[in-house]
Amino acid sequence: MHPNPDWPLYEIFVRARGGLDHKHVGSVHAADAAMALEHARDVYTRRLEGVSVWVVRSTDILASDPAEADALFEPARDKVYRHPTFYDIPKEVETL
Amino acid sequence: MSATGDSAANRDAPGAPLEYVLRLGDTALVLAQRLGEWIGHAPAIEEDLGLANTALDLLGQARLLLAYAGEIEGRGRGEDDLAFLREESAFRNATLAEMPNGDFGDTIVRQLLLDAYQVPLYERLSASRDPRLAEIAAKALKESRYHLRYSSGWVVRLGDGTEESHARVQASLERLWPYTLELFDADELDRAVVASGVGPDPRAVEQDWSIRVDAVLAEATLARPATARYRWYGKQGRHSEHLGHLLAEMQHLPRVHPGARW
């Protein structure tokens, strides 16, 4: 098989079922967004994994710098009071 | 068969003739085998999966149809017996389905011509007076609609792509076009099936096919080839030289190792 010549990379997000959020599942190469959608369907929803698909050009995603992780995320470590642990969650709510 | 299978209405409903179900099933089976030949060779891994998905859909259709054919025949032959133990001349697939893959453009054009045929065919078969056939067609229709979307998209990309892709895919179209005539050339069996309400009039399917194909060709900036005079009759068991080779590969394992399982 040939490598994909000059197709850009797209990140794929799949919604497993109504009411849930779209989750990142991987990426595909495609000539444009429409083709990326078809590729995503063929690659990531073959086993009934989803009811909706989003595709985003990988270069359109701005990612945080791992080197800055300490500054960005460490300060939250000792602030347990931010967790809403005092709520009782009804059993019927499955996907909070 | 559904729970209403023994109601008076269904008992009187005409059943599809064996030959007709074989035409449908064999076309799906042979096309599935052809698409399967791409696995590991497609231009990109995403297309590899796309073609394999389509092949598996068609294989699923073939299984349902050949299992039904075996029941109609009533000689105890199942889907595997019909797929793997029949001779070339017993196959009733449309000749177009057995045409070699060629390059990716050839495969995509063959796929468009057959997808645009199966969609209107299955649409009408969903209303067949044979309830079993109607059920199978309704399931297959959803799959074939996606196949048509996939092949249409690629024909437009290649036709309206570079100078080379345009020229090559136009040549594929010219090469494969003569094999489409058979699809709409009603023979005695087609007429009998129309008369009993089991299958659609091929002329009605042709009109629908033409509209769909013309729309794709226009967007792809491709020219519709002139109608050729020569007709093939794979559906009557008279095949091109390509089917024998395809069957040799497809049938080799079950013939050499009868009853082999995973």
Image (cartoon, coloured by chain):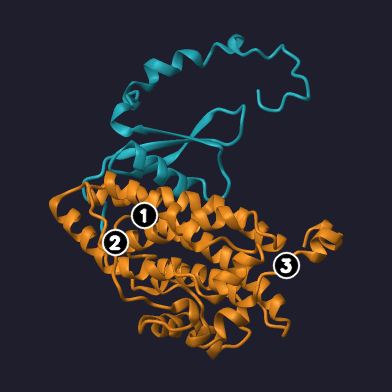
Chain colours: A cyan, B orange
- Indicate which disc residue B104 carries: 2
Q: CA distance from mark 1 to mark 3?
A: 41 Å
Is B59 situated above or below B44?
A: below
Given the image, what chain letter belongs to the residue carrying mark 3? B
Residue that mark 3 sits on: B14
Amino acid tagged 3: Pro
Is B235 situated above or below B176?
A: below
Amino acid tagged 2: Phe
Given the image, what chain letter belongs to the residue carrying mark 2? B
Both marks 1 and 3 on one chain: yes
Question: Left of B77 or right of it: where is B253?
Answer: left
In this view, the mark in front (3 or 2): 3
Q: Are marks 1 and 3 in contact (CB under 8 Å)?
A: no
Residue nearest the viewer, comparing A82 with B211: B211
Is B43 situated above or below B25?
A: above
Both marks 3 and 2 on one chain: yes
Q: Is residue B25 visible?
A: no
Secondary structure at badge 2 equals helix
Amino acid tagged 1: Glu
Residue nearest the viewer, comparing B221 with A79: B221
Question: Left of A75 or right of it: where is A29?
Answer: left
Secondary structure at badge 3 equals loop
